Image (cartoon, rainbow, N blue to C red):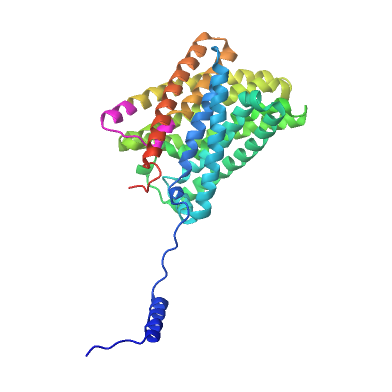
């Protein structure tokens, strides 16, 4: 016998059923931002370094400074867009953002935020002042330098702390990515001297100079602790996975940036500190910079050989390709600084040759990034 339920009873049953039904997962806002990691700041760094390096090359071609201004403007716009997108990531996907911090493969990329702020800020004083005026450039660089330095110093502590306490990494996981949070203070040391001429004479300038040398020491000594782990991983564990092979170029970052830093600081030493330190710091720029640049060229040859090997084995595009840009750019500025202080044409030629390599790497990475964004692959969930 069929039974017909009363409408009121049916409504009550449905209400009770909904009460016992598990709550549905709320719809996430801006799903495209969920997998937008801090590694994207590397694209800003790689764009800004073209402006900074190109404007300081010993050789200047017609229209070169205008091109550098365009790259600076592009990097500034990209930084603004990315800061907004990353803020949306933290706002709407906080669980994923926290997961990134606890992921040993992703957390080191938080150092890229600091370096992106510093690189764009430095470019503002190098070439951006031509477009926005000197006073605005000084104000912008002051804000970006202060924020980038604070974040860089914080990440230089936070990321290693997480690696020790939370990440539980193994020696086989060692990669040049671990250097990222440690290099950020060196970028501050290299770009801080740009602000020294705009500080009052006396103690403010001396304090800035010595603070930059302190950050130089922080980054250099931390890098010297980490590099043996990375090289030992390569020798004992074999080549990195194909997608990580471009990160070998990250080792050039502390080498080129430290050479840039000692040369930039030597330029500002006579304005900031008295004798005999000013002369000693000028000599130190050459005594330190030449051997380190030599080792950078050795590592560059090794990294290129490993990159060719990975390409022959089918290495596809990944955002790690941006590692081919900023570190090479620091070697350009380092070689240009040595050309200034030694007067050797060989360093000027080296800077020009490395700059050509930098531009080629940027064009390659930028093309594949735009194509990957258009296809929706780069913001998809990792497989």
**Residue 372 spot, x, y in % from top left:** 38, 37
Query: Looking at this rendering, what residue extends furthest in the left direction?
Result: 1
Q: Is residue 58 magenta?
A: no
For this rendering, which residue is in front, 67 or 208? 67
- Residue sitting at 57 percent across and 29 percent down? 73
Q: Across the whole image, how many numbered discs are drawn on residues?
A: 0
- Check the image and report above or below for 293 versus 163: above
Residue 56 visible in the current orientation:
no
State the residue in front, 93 or 221. Answer: 93
Could you tell me which residue is drawn at 45 percent across and 45 percent down? 36
With 287 as the anchor, is 321 left or right in this view? Answer: left
Magenta segment boundaries in residue numbering: 306-323
Left or right of 3? Residue 118 is right
Q: Position of residue 67 (x, y in %)?
A: 54, 21
- Residue at image location 41% in from the left, 83% down from the top: 12
Residue 281, located in which quarter of the rendered image? top right
Q: Farthest residue in the bottom direction? A: 1
State which quarter of the image contains the N terminus: bottom left
Main SS of residues in magenta: helix
- Specify whether 272 is left or right of 347: right
Q: Does any portion of residue 378 appear in the rendered image?
A: yes
The reply to whether the magenta stretch includes residue 311 is yes
Q: Quadrant of residue 266?
A: top right
x and y, in percent, of residue 296 in the image: 45, 23
Residue 163: x, y in percent?
46, 48
Q: Give the residue at x 67% y 18%.
A: 279
């Amino acid at each position: 016998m069929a039974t017909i339920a009363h409408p009121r009873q049916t409504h009550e049953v449905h209400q009770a059923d909904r009460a016992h039904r598990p709550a549905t997962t709320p719809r996430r806002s801006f799903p495209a931002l969920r997998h937008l990691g801090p590694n994207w700041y590397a694209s800003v760094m790689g764009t800004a370094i073209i402006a900074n390096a190109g404007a300081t090359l010993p050789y200047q071609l017609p229209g070169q400074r205008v091109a550098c201004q365009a790259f600076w403007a592009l990097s500034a716009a990209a930084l603004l867009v990315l800061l907004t997108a990353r803020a949306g990531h933290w706002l709407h996907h906080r669980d994923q953002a926290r997961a990134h911090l606890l992921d040993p493969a992703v957390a080191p990329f938080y150092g890229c935020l600091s370096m992106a702020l510093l690189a764009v800020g430095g470019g503002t004083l190098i070439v951006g002042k031509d477009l926005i005026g000197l006073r605005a450039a000084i104000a912008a660089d002051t804000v970006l330098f202060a924020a980038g330095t604070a974040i860089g110093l914080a990440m230089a502590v936070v990321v290693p702390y997480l690696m020790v306490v939370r990440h539980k990494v193994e020696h086989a996981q060692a990669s040049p990515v671990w250097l990222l949070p440690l290099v950020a203070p060196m970028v501050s040391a290299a770009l801080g001297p740009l602000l020294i001429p705009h500080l009052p004479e006396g103690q403010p300038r001396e304090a800035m100079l010595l603070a930059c040398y302190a950050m130089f020491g922080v980054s250099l000594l931390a890098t010297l602790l980490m590099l043996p782990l990375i090289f030992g991983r390569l020798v004992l564990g074999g080549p990195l996975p194909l997608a990580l092979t471009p990160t070998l170029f990250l080792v050039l970052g502390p080498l080129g940036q430290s050479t840039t830093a000692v040369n930039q600081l030597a330029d500002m030493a006579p304005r900031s500190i008295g004798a005999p330190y000013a002369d000693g710091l000028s000599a130190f720029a050459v005594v330190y910079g030449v051997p380190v640049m030599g080792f950078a060229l050795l590592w560059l040859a090794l990294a290129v050989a490993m990159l060719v090997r990975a390409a022959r084995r089918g290495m596809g595009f990944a955002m790690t390709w941006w590692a081919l840009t900023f570190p090479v750019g620091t070697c350009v500025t380092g070689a240009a600084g040595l050309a200034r202080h030694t007067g050797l044409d060989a360093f000027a030629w080296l800077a020009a040759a490395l700059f050509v390599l930098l531009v080629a790497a940027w064009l390659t990475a930028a093309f594949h990034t735009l194509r990957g964004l258009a296809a929706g692959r780069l913001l998809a969930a990792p497989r």
